[in-house]
Image: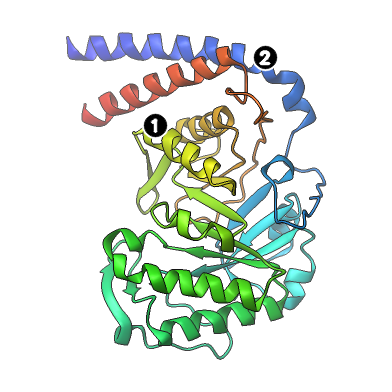
Amino acid sequence: MKSKLIVEFAFLAVMILFISTILVLKINVGNLQKNQLMYSNFSIARDPAGIKESNITFAVYYGDAVNESVIKYLNNFSMVILEPWAFNSSTLAEIRGIKIAYIDLGEYDNSSLGSCYINATEISLGYDAFWDQVIVNASSPLWQDYIMCEVKYVLNEGFNGVLFDDLDVVDEYPSVGGGIIHILNETKNSYPGIIIGVNRGFDILPNITKYIDFVMYEDYGTQVVSQGKVSFVGNEDYIIQETSKIRELNVTLLALAYAERPGDAFFNFSERLAAAEGIPLYVTNWNVTALWPQQFIPHNTKTKYPISKFTYIILRLEHFLFTRWYLIFSIS
């Protein structure tokens, strides 16, 4: 009986998804054709105040392989966020877009840039078992000097800015909030012309927007749960609420999501959720090394619904079916 219900539900879900997808594509096909992202040339109009969602396409690549194929892929985007230890001044010179260096602010990611050195065990607050990293005391002068050393190094190599990660540690360790603000303030004052971004850190965002140019919302609809495994975040309402809160702070918002394969249910759902919320999105694999084709779905931030209201409702229906179907097959 249970297997029969599962089959019937699956068939109904597939039919609704197929029909709704056709309708969505029909509504947006004109714009989609004009805004196809992959394997074209792009440019970004650099605004004196920073970067703008309306004219940015971006990629996130944390792989250590840097070759002709990687450079060619990255040159399809107006901004790229990269692991700085994998790139040098020569390879960075081949990338046409804005180059942002990933720097872990809340945890020690076991990397080494130039002569920058830290014994993280001396300032340890905890341990991130999933990524095998030490959670550090960002208020420590040792850590602050180390981060500023890394910032100086990446800018000298040819990066145009930095993305600070793991600001969410402030949720568990509120005492590090002052240290995070201090580092952002010092970075902004020392290098006023660079682009500064942060990954998440929602609780501290209202206190740091004057120092940053953009926020990257990681786990936008999907998240990594183990090596090679991705799941739906599940609480879509929370994502929409946080998106609205960030927009009220008047800061550029980008989204990062995960999938197991290009075009799978995770990929498509995150893409459509970001389109419905009007957010530039990049979808990658669990360790952020994939070079997948991306689709930029145009949005109109002047309206309540970045795409048509009908399309928005269809996407919400698809999410309901995706999550229920996923849970049923996970349990069975």
- The Cα–Cα distance between marks 2 and 1, rounded to whole angstroms, is 23 Å
The extreme bottom residue here reads 115
Give the image location of residue 296, x and y in percent.
Answer: 67, 36
Give the image location of residue 212, x and y in percent.
Answer: 58, 60
Residue holding disc 2: 27
Q: State the count of labels.
A: 2
Quadrant where the C terminus lies?
top left
Which three-letter amino acid code belongs to the residue tagged 1? Answer: Glu
Q: Is residue 195 above or below residue 90?
A: above
Residue holding disc 1: 236
Question: On the image, which quarter does residue 121 sit in?
Answer: bottom left
Quadrant where the N terminus lies?
top left
Question: On the image, which quarter does residue 27 sit in?
Answer: top right
Which three-letter amino acid code belongs to the residue tagged 2? Answer: Ile
Give the image location of residue 57, x and y in percent.
Answer: 69, 46
Structural crowding at the residue carrying mark 2, measured as other residues with C-alpha within 10 Å and reported as few (<14), some (14–19) or many (≥20): some
In the displayed structure image, the side of residue 55 where residue 146 appears, left or right: left
Residue 105 seen in this snapshot: no
Callout 2 secondary element: helix
Callout 1 secondary element: helix
In the displayed structure image, the side of residue 37 where residue 245 appears, left or right: left
In the displayed structure image, the side of residue 184 where residue 91 appears, left or right: right
Q: Is 192 or 291 nearer to us in this picture?
A: 192
Which residue: 46% across, 59% down? 207
2 or 1: tag closer to the N-terminus: 2
